[in-house]
Amino acid sequence: MENLEKTYYPIVAKFLLKSYQCFKTQTNAGLRYSRADVIGIRDTGGDFTGEIETIIIEVKRGSEAFATASGQAYGYTVYANRVYLADKRITNFTPLEVQIASHLGIGLIKIDAKNKCSVALTSPYYKPMTKMNADLLEKLCLCKCQFCESYFETGDIKNRYSKVSKEKVKKAIDEGKGVVFWNREISTRKEKHKVRIGKENTTYERRFICSDCVNLLGQFKTE
């Protein structure tokens, strides 16, 4: 069953790219508490903000219990702004299935006999848990700039930090990269209260600055 469902992942991902103008998608992404079938990220902030929207889609082959599958999709609200159940089926969703999905608060996508996707019910907008959403985006190599608050790519799957310099601003300017730095004060505070304990002299408190903001900061440098 799992392998059969995976054949629809690229179809749904392509649908997100085209119909939802997602600039990034990923399939079969392993998260800490679950595994997302299809993830899409799109810009929604207009010309004056860098706001983005995270979409997660649970993909089924049309033979699973509908309420159970819908519940799985709803569980992704801890990670994403919108969640959908994409179901492979010849017939349309029944009125009762639409009511169930609407009651739970998920969207519905039909994958028809020709593998064409269409939205049967739009997902409501959710505010996910900040930590969970940030963890998800970082897995996709997307992090928030501390200055302009836009999300930018820090690297790729092979090297998540290939597009940022580690605490070296001049190097970042020369190479046209962003910067990653570590907030050691917060790390010490968390360690003191046993919120996050790592290896000795190690901090996990990563913060990022995009290449555009690094270049802007470089203009303030006095010779």
Image (cartoon, rainbow, N blue to C red):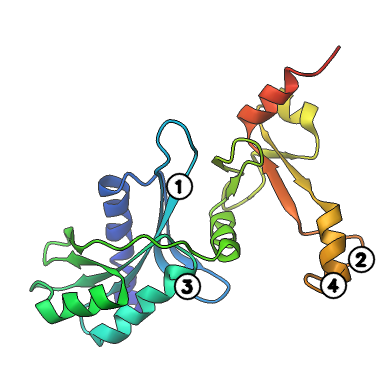
User: For mark 1, does the 10 Å Cα neighbourhood hold few (<14), some (14 to 19), or many (20 or more) residues?
Assistant: some
Does residue 53 appear to the left or right of 156 in the view shown?
A: left
Residue 211 position within the rendered picture, expressed as x and y whole percent measured from the top left:
64, 31
Q: Residue furthest right?
A: 200
Q: Nearer the viewer, mark 3 or mark 1?
A: 1
Q: Look at mark 1 in the image and give the residue it sits on.
A: 52
User: For mark 3, does the 10 Å Cα neighbourhood hold few (<14), some (14 to 19), or many (20 or more) residues?
Assistant: few
Would you say residue 175 is visible in this rendering? Answer: no
What kind of element bears circle 2? Answer: loop
Residue 204 position within the rendered picture, expressed as x and y whole percent measured from the top left:
77, 59
Q: In the picture, residue 103 is in which quadrant?
A: bottom left
User: Label 1 amino acid?
Assistant: Ile
User: For mark 2, does the 10 Å Cα neighbourhood hold few (<14), some (14 to 19), or many (20 or more) residues?
Assistant: few
Q: Look at mark 2 in the image and give the residue it sits on.
A: 200
Does residue 189 appear to the left or right of 47 in the view shown?
A: right
Tell me what residue is drawn at x 68 percent, y 43 percent. Answer: 208
Q: Look at mark 3 in the image and give the residue it sits on.
A: 35
Residue nearest the observer in this picture, 82 or 201:
82
User: Label 4 amino acid?
Assistant: His
Badge 4 or badge 3: first in the primary sequence = 3
Q: Nearer the viewer, mark 1 or mark 2?
A: 1
What kind of element bears circle 1? Answer: strand
Tell me what residue is drawn at x 67 percent, y 23 percent. Answer: 216
- On residue 193, the disc is 4
Question: Measured along the vertical axis of the image, is residue 207 above or below residue 187?
Answer: above
The CA distance from mark 2 to mark 3 is: 31 Å
Pointer 2 with pointer 4, Cβ within 8 A: no
User: Label 3 amino acid?
Assistant: Arg
Does residue 70 appear to the left or right of 172 in the view shown?
A: left
